[in-house]
Image: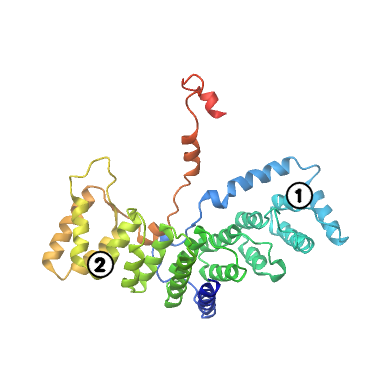
Amino acid sequence: MAVAFRSPRRAVLQALRSLVYAGVGGSTCCRCPLGAKRYLLTNNIVKLKEFQHKKVAIACNLPGTKETYLRHLEEKLTQNKLILKEELKTLLHLCESRHDVELAKNVIYRYHAENRNVTLGEYKFGPLFMRLCYELDLEESAVELIKDQHLRGFFSDSTSFNILMDMLFIKGKYKSALEVLIEMKNQDVKFSKDTYVLAFAICYKLNSPESFKVCTTLREEALIKGDILSRRASCFAVALALNQNQVEKATSIFSQIMNPESIICINLRLMIHIQSNMSKTLEILKDATEGNVSKFVKKLKFSEEVLAKVREKVKDVPALLATFDELYGKLHISGQVTAYTLDALLCHTPKDLKSHAVHLNKRTVSRRTFQPLSQSLWAE
């Protein structure tokens, strides 16, 4: 079984390196300001607010001043004294500037050198440092450390790499994000579902034959391993295939998406049919305008940009154009047309569902009396 994985992994790394060294920089697919710079990770992954709240709490409970604490750590570095786990954790929560982060980097190097062989059950500092860089807009420092061979093993979790790639994605630094993906692959850090979303989104933004090859190879490797690819990741792969005029591949990937009823899936399906079957395209629009759907059922929505492509395709056929214009008018009247571009829909990050789930799971009835609990007891 090991032999089966070795070849795809080499293929992925080779494709990734060739894409970076070829000098692919920005995206040619993103022409709309709505979709120009987006984040992909939800708040429950980045956890920036929690990090900032913890920073305030630690600063308030610090014995003495921040300056005294930083000077104490500088002295420990100079005197070659042991850096403790809690000291590094506190330091990362006290950093407020680039200068503070430079000290933190030196402490990280010392701490990792002293503890590189102690990994089992150890606290993961990687995500903490990435959240700090995320807060202070220091992605260069984050990239520098995550690629440094002397810190191999310090960033051993997917969350560190994911937060950094998201940070770079926000700023449109897709080539740098790809380099981080390569480093993650080189360090044998296991990909999570979020990693595949980020990887395919980066390839989609680069929008080149090379990035399409990387996306395809990563996807095939994931399927071989049995990794689960989310609907969102697959949608980026479909969009990239369409941008590269690989309609057959886009159709194949789309056919494997479970529950393709989301707004982005509906628009991607329309894009596929625009390039392969116009009669099916108009049939989808006609079904969407039918008035026999219950008012409780959410109506399908179509991107104005996608509908413009449909019109462009049928403009030279009077009969089809007349049919489309009629359907387009009905869709507008029923509020089924959105101004968001396909790119904006793809890069839209859904809200966290965790807080709602927690609220729904709270007990509202007493187990003893079977009477409704008071609001004050719910809070407990």
Disc number placed over residue 326 in the picture, else none = none
Can you give x and y, in whole percent of width and height, for residue 96 in the image?
69, 52
Residue 34 visible in the displayed image: no
Q: Residues within 10 Å of mark 2 (few under 14, many from 20)?
A: many
Q: Nearer the viewer, residue 305 or 196?
A: 196
Task: Label 2: state its secondary structure.
Answer: helix
The residue under label 1 is 86
Expressed as whole percent of the image width and height from the top left, the position of residue 119 reads 71, 58
Residue 109, located in which quarter of the rendered image?
bottom right
**SS at badge 1:** helix
Residue 274 is labelled as 2
Mark pair 2, 1: CA separation: 58 Å
Of marks 2 and 1, which one's residue comes earlier in the chain? 1
- Vertical position of residue 354 compared to residue 257: above or below: above
Residue drawn at (58%, 49%) of the image: 47
Residue type of the residue flagged with mark 2: Ile
Q: Are marks 2 and 1 in contact (CB under 8 Å)?
A: no
Position above or below: 362 against 291: above
Q: Residue at x 77, y 51 (%)?
A: 87
Q: Is 334 placed above or below 76 here?
A: above
- Left or right: 218 as drawn, with respect to 330: right
Instruction: Give coordinates of residue 41: x percent, y percent.
Output: 51, 55
Asked whether the viewer can see residue 61, the reply is yes
What colour scheme governs how the chains and residues are painted in the rendered image of this protein? rainbow
Label 1: how many Cα within 10 Å (few below 14, some 14–19, many 20+): few
Please, which residue is most extreme toward the left here? 319
- Relative to 28, is 352 above or below? above
